[in-house]
Structure formats: C-alpha cells, structure tokens
Image (spheres, coloured by chain):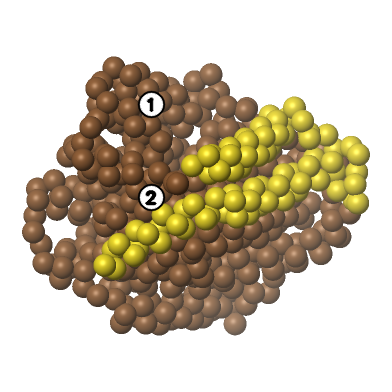
Amino acid sequence: MEEYRKKRNLVVTLVIVWFVLFLLQGAGIFGASVEPVIMGLPFSVVYLLIMGIWGVVNAILAVKLLSPFFYAKADALMKGNDE
Amino acid sequence: MSSIGWLITIVAAYILIVLVIGYLGYKQSKATAEDYYMGGRGLGTLVLTGTSIATYASLWTFLGAVGGNYRIGITFISMMMMWNILWPLMIWFVGTKVWLLGKKFKYITYSEVVNDYYGTKWLGIIAAIFGILALLPYIAVQLMGGGIAIETFTQGQISFAAGVTITFIFMVLIISVAGLRSVVWTDTFQGIFFLSVMIGLAIYALTLAGGTTSLFSDLATNHTSLLIPGKMGVGIWLGFVLTWGIAILLPHMFQRLMMAKDPRTIGKVTIASSILSGWVQTIPVFLLGICCVVLIPGITGKGTDSMTVLFANKFLSPAFAAIVIGGAFAAGTSTLNSQLLTASSLFLRDLVVNPFNLKLKPEQETTIARITVIVMGIIVLLIALGRPGLIVPISTAGTAICISSYLFPLFGILYWKRAGKLSAYASMIAAGVAAIVTWLVWPFPLGIYNVLWGYIIGGVAFFLVSLIEKSPQTAIQAEVASLLKYE
C-alpha cells in the first residue's frame, strides 16, 4: 500500500503541476508571448507543444508506475469470476 | 460530375461501407442487453481506442473546433489540447476502478452503479434524466453538423433540413438494427477515416499558407491576437477544460469504461488515446483553423462553424471536397450512434426496467431498445431542425449539466467512504440545478462557466451532508471498498 501511495502521489503531483502551468497559459499569464520565435514558431506555440508532450508523458508514467497494482487486483477478480 | 453528384457518390459509398461493417458486427451479436449495449464486455485495444476517440471527437471537432481556432487561435487550442490529454488520464484514474466495478457487479449504466452502492432507486432515475437531457442536445448538434456540412458543400442546393434528415435516417438504420458491436466497429473505421481526412486537410492548408514559418510570421504581423492566449475569461476557459476533460462521465463514455476485455487493454487505451486525442486530433484542427484565417479571411459568428467545408469548397476539387463531407459524416455519426444507443439504454433500463423491476426476456429488451432508439431519434431530429446557436457552446453547456451532477456521487464510491445516499442526492440535485440555472436563467455569472458552478455547489452540498449523515456500513459498500483498495 505504501509503495502504491508513493507512486500515485508522484503521478498526481506531476499532473497537477502540468495542469497549473497549462492553466497559466490559458489565463494569458505565462507562456503567452509571441517572442522569442523558436524555429519559426512563436513562443506561445512552443510552450503549448511542450505542455502537450508533458501531458502524454504523464499518461505513460501513470500507466507504467501504477499498473502492477491495478493488474494484480483485476487478475484476481477475473480468476475469481472464472471459478 | 457536379458537386451534388460527387456528394451523393461519396456519401453513398461511405454509407455502404459502414452498413457492411455494421452488418458484420450484427452477425456476431447476441440478443442480450449486455451484448446489445456493452459488446459483451470484450473489446480489445484497437476497437476500444477507436470507439473512444471516434465517439469523443464529434462534428464538434470537425467543424466547431476548427471554427473556434479560426476565431480565437491559441486560446482555443490550449484548452482543447489540455482536455484532450486530461480525459485519457481520467480513463486511468477513474476508468480502472469503474472497470473493476463493472466486472464484479455487471453494471451497464451509471445509474445502476450509484443505485446499487447507495441503496437508492430515485438517484438512478435522476441521473438518467440528467443524462438524457445532456445527450439529446449533443446528439442534435451532430445532426445539425451533418446538415450544415451538406448545405454548405452544395451551396444550398440541398437544404439544411434535408441534410439533417439524411443523416438521421442513416444513423437510426445502423443503431436500431445492430447495437453496440456494430457501433464500435463502425466507430473504428469512422475514426480512422475522419482523422485521416483532417490530417490531409491540415497538411494541404499549411502548404497553401506557405508553410509554418510563413504562416506564423503572417499571423504575428496581421493577427497577433490569435497567438496570444487569454482571449476567453479564465472562468469560461477552465469551465470548458473541466467539462470535456472529465467527459468520461458522460453516459456513453462511462459505459465504455466497462467494455475492455481485460485490464491491460485499459492501460494501452489510456496511452494511445492521449497521443491520438491530444495530438493527432488536436494539431490538425488548430492548423486548419489558423490557416483559414489567412486563406479565407473575414468569416464571423455561426459562419465559422462551416470553416472546414468552406475550405474544401474553395480549394479542393468536387471529388475531394465530397470526401471531406464524408469525413464530417464520419465524425458526427460515430458520436451520434454511441450517444443515441446509450440514451436508449438510460431510458429503458434506468427509467423503465430497473425502477419497476420488470422481467423482460433478452429478445424483448433488445426489441424495445430498438424502438426506443427510433423514437428518441425523432425527438432529436425535431430539435436539430430548429437549428439553435453555435455548435460548441450548445454541446458544452448541456454536457456540463450531466458531468457536474454525476461527479460527486461517483467520487464518493471511489474515494470518499463517508458519503451516503443523502450526500449523493444532495450533490446530484444541487449540481444539476446549478448548472442548468447558470446556463439558461443567469448565464455564466461572474464569468464562470456553468460546469464550475455545478462542481462548486454540488461539491459543497456533497461534503457538508457527508459530514452530517452517518457513515454508511452496508455490505455492498464494504465489498466495493475492498475491491477498490490496492495492496
């Protein structure tokens, strides 16, 4: 249970930080400027793309770190159903 | 061949393909409610990802979201990308637990889950009513989108009303005969088709606009506001994110949480959906919208909902433009079919069979389900023919009512053991009423979207009442707590 909680808290923290930084862009407070231009893209677009990559990384981490606990529970349930 | 000739050819070919796929699914189906509504709980990664993405991304994406990016640029895409990554995350955090519940107790609808856990009858009835109220305008939006696409493409030679009716007839044919198995198989085909069309359109539009450097340089010089976020109040922006980001609570998405054949499918669907929804769906929509600012300037208001079709008409040959209409059809019908089927299950199981404890034979239930689909479809057709407002706000506000009312009772089952039936009733009714009032009576007070008002008022009601009422001790609640506790 302790190991599960640590991993869950790590994932939740990453998601919350991601959410807040994305919200700050949505509110026009952070990542909201056109300058500097990076590889032909305005900074606001680059920031958006970084948030997009981070979001997918969050999904991958959530599955990789927490799946053993869910799969163990689910496999036991399915075995019980079969019996 | 004329535009109408190509339209008829492409749409007829598309309908034929979908009907064939649908028929193959029908041949595999059994005459049971679990098979008709849930595909026997046996969906693999490809089909479950396909149906989730295709169901989630509707004509809203194909037409409304392109229009949104056209109007407010990065303000729109930032919230769209956020919610398109958030809902796959919710599949993992919420969907895994709902899957366990579905596997253990054989639930088909959200109402069955809450009724069983809280020992209620009326909670499920209220949930079903809110669910149907949310789904009907959303379904109407899909029909409207079909009508808009056909009318715009044919420059009015086929009217909006005729386009809506054509879409309706086609959809009811598939769903009423075949049920969920056909829905998910056709969804997968439709999802691949409309994503491919959208990617193709975006690449072509970007080429016409001179490439990314030229496009963004033009926008930075002439339309700077499109590249600076914050053009929507944060209360509205966040409201959209927390509506569509938690859209797995919508009845048709909630049912999909219980359809995976095994737990590992859910993990793969989570990751695949975050990439397909967050990137493959979102970026082309953004690019097409902002390219159109340069290529087709000066469109405003409801006209922007037709942006995709206007682009196709202006820059594509009639044959390719008809394929775009086919893509619009695919986007809309893949959502509409799931929603209509789910609305039918809500009505039949949650408002008729379960409350009155009817014992129907499986064949009887599926026959009545088919009739319900047709009747509800007619109601939705009449709504769509009225052609209310912009696509995005209508479907979002209606969705908000359902999601805000469903959230806390489910939260209580998954995470807050203090909650009992009173908390669930209080939060569902308070949230639903708040979301309705702050949309229709006193629209978005203090610049805060109705879903946020639903969450705030529903949440306050939920936690306050849970602190007052006695902690529940029923056998089913203990069983659920044990089931959802990870070692």
Type of the residue with mark 2: Val
The amino acid type found where label 1 is placed reads Gly
Q: Residue at x 63, y 51 (%)?
A: A61
Image position, residue B109 (x, y; %):
29, 51
Give the left or right position of residue B1, taking residue B379 as reference: right
Whichever of callouts 1 and 2 sits on the residue coming sooner in the sequence is 2
Q: Which mark is residue B458?
A: 1
Image quadrant assignment for residue B326: bottom right
Choose between B163 and B211: the one closer to the eye.
Answer: B211
Numbered tag placed on residue B98 in the rendering: 2
Residue beneath the point at 55% across and 50% down? A66
Chain that is coloured brown in the picture: B
Helix, strand or loop at mark 1: helix
Q: Is residue B153 visible?
A: no
Residue B415 lies left or right of residue B93; in this view the side is left
Identify the element where label 2 is drawn: helix
Which of labels 1 and 2 is toward the front? 2
Q: Quadrant of residue B198?
A: bottom right
- Residues packed near mark 2 inside 10 Å, few (<14), some (14 to 19) or many (20 plus): many
Of residues B384 and B438, the one drawn nearer to the viewer in this rendering: B438
Within-10-Å neighbours for mark 1: few <14, some 14–19, many 20+: many
Observer-nearest residue: B161 or B125?
A: B125
User: Which colour represents chain A?
Assistant: yellow
| Label number found at residue B218 | none
When the figure is inspected, residue B154 is found, relative to residue B63, above or below; the finding is: below
